[in-house]
Image (tube, rainbow, N blue to C red):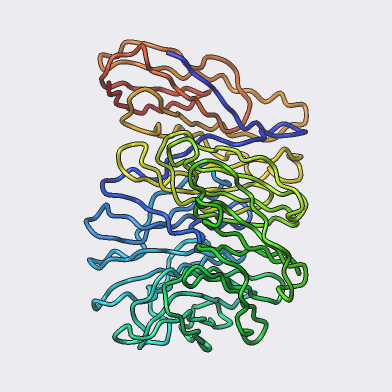
């Protein structure tokens, strides 16, 4: 049996840097799905990371939510936001300081309608309700953003009978949706379905959508400007920082779907030329883009090697240059990624069929920074041994545990730790860890190729703390 150990150690100078492992966030019957790239299914504010998806574990499509208050290190349980017998799909998420906002599509009367809810810190969600206009049905693909305390939603809406289509622009109240009083709405007539994306930056909103292979743009300070034709393509996503606006999309102009990009340096007044960002065999689709200052972070799904995987690239200078494509997964079934950034930590979620059932997976990137400045608040407060993921498993699984303590500049605070595996008869079969370790988050990647199928127990002893979990090995 092989083991690989990773740790986030809170030493005085720097902490772990680089891409962490894939983390499975769901484990339930039925599929779990992220939305298309126009909507963000992950949001973050400080150390708190929020994830939303739709889920079929209860026999119908419900909206589920999950959060981590430790920057993605550990996760709380799944929360069902809808819990109805009616299908609910395509959620979108936005965070503004300690407030979290979600919108999605529900079907209470045979028509798809827009729904909204919000919560402080992701706790005690407001009962979902329909924003106006109430005579619009056949809604689809919402994208939500928050400007100061005002909630804004772009979505595909149609009137009763679905004879009129348009991009509906919804303005929320100054209380951020709590009083259920929505200020106004506006629509743009369209002939074909589209996928709107919205972002807030400074005092301005920016929106993009596509219509029959053409991408359109509009912005708003007090009122939405007339739409501008940007380019050809589909599935756009918009990001912005100060006066800089960035749009990413997919297009078949070169014979297969590739990722394209363009930017505006003056809040959308004028635009630079299209730039092709991918150039590989196969298809590159559904890009999701986010900015952190003038650094752009891009993820998309790609089958250049014959299977759908999640790829990432970055521009450290506002789109002038881009790093090479980086494959983040290697499972053959990773789709529809969504990305956000908070305090230099990149957070990505996607849907993945590696376990024979679509589940939600998560990955993060930790930048090397000074602990005193950024990570004191992420020091574990309690001992914890987590359930291995996945479980049951065939060959590989991951075990996480955390050791609490106080940061010491001399870096000498140690706890004697042992992590051992026992078979069902109580016989010790492997010792994974037996050494003093510092405060931090630890991860063991376990290769069980020399173990027989069956039930096993793994036991963590750290000082006076003891915890035991069970895993099932399949062959």
Tag count in the figure? 0
**Residue at image point 74% right, 40% down:** 369
Which percent across, then down, holds residue 84? 26, 66
Which percent across, then down, holds residue 281? 52, 41
- Residue 118 visible, this orientation: no
Question: Is 45 located above or below residue 299 in the figure?
Answer: below
448 left or right, relative to 276 = left
**Residue at image point 57% right, 33% down:** 441
- For residue 248, which quarter of the picture? bottom right
Which percent across, then down, holds residue 382? 53, 38
Quadrant where the N terminus sits is top left
Question: Is 398 located above or below residue 426 in the figure?
Answer: below
Quadrant where the C terminus sits is top left
Seen from the viewer's position, the closer of residues 367 and 80 is: 367
- For residue 166, which quarter of the picture? bottom left
404 left or right, relative to 10 = left
**Residue at image point 46% right, 52% down:** 336
**Residue at image point 64% right, 23% down:** 414
- Residue 196 visible, this orientation: yes
């Amino acid at each position: 049996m092989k083991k690989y150990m990773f740790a986030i150690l809170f030493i005085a100078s720097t902490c772990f840097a680089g891409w962490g492992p894939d983390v499975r966030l769901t484990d339930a019957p039925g599929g779990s799905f992220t939305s298309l790239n126009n909507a963000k299914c992950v949001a973050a504010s400080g150390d708190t990371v929020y994830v939303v998806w739709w889920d079929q574990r209860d026999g119908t499509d419900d909206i589920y939510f999950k959060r981590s208050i430790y920057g993605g290190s550990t996760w709380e349980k799944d929360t069902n936001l809808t819990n109805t017998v009616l299908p609910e799909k395509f959620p979108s998420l936005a965070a503004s300081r300690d407030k979290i906002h979600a919108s999605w599509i529900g079907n209470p009367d045979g028509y798809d309608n827009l729904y909204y809810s919000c919560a402080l810190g992701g706790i005690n969600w407001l009962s979902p309700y329909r924003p106006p206009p109430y005579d619009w049905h056949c809604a689809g693909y919402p994208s939500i953003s928050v400007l100061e305390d005002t909630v804004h939603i772009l979505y595909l809406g149609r009137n009763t009978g679905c004879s009129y289509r348009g991009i509906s622009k919804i303005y929320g109240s100054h209380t951020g949706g709590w009083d259920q009083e929505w200020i106004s709405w506006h629509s743009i007539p369209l002939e074909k379905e589209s996928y709107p994306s919205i972002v807030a930056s400074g005092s301005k909103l920016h929106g993009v959508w596509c219509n029959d292979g053409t991408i359109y743009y509009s912005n708003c300070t007090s009122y939405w400007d007339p739409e501008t034709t940007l380019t050809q393509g589909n599935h756009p996503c918009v990001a912005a920082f100060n006066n800089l606006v960035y749009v990413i999309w997919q297009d078949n102009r070169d014979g297969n779907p590739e990722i394209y990009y363009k930017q505006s340096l003056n809040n959308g007044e004028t635009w630079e030329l299209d730039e092709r960002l991918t150039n590989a065999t196969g298809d590159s689709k559904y890009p999701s883009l986010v900015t952190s200052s003038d650094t752009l972070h891009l993820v998309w799904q790609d089958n250049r090697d014959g299977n759908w995987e999640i790829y990432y690239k970055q521009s450290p200078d506002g789109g002038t240059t881009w790093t090479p494509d980086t494959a983040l997964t290697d499972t053959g079934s990773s789709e529809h990624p969504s990305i956000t950034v908070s305090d230099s930590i990149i957070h990505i979620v996607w849907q993945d069929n590696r376990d024979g059932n679509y589940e939600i997976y998560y990955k993060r990137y930790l930048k090397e920074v000074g602990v005193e400045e950024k990570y004191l608040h992420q020091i574990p407060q309690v001992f914890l041994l987590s359930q291995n993921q996945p479980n049951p498993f065939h060959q590989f699984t991951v075990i996480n545990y955390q050791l609490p303590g106080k940061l010491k500049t001399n870096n000498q605070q140690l706890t004697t730790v042992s992590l051992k595996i026992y078979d069902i008869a109580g016989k010790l079969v492997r010792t994974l860890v037996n050494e003093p370790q510092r405060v931090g988050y630890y991860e063991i990647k376990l290769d069980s190729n020399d173990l027989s199928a069956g039930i096993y127990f793994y036991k963590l002893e750290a000082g006076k703390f003891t915890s035991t979990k069970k895993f099932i090995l399949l062959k």
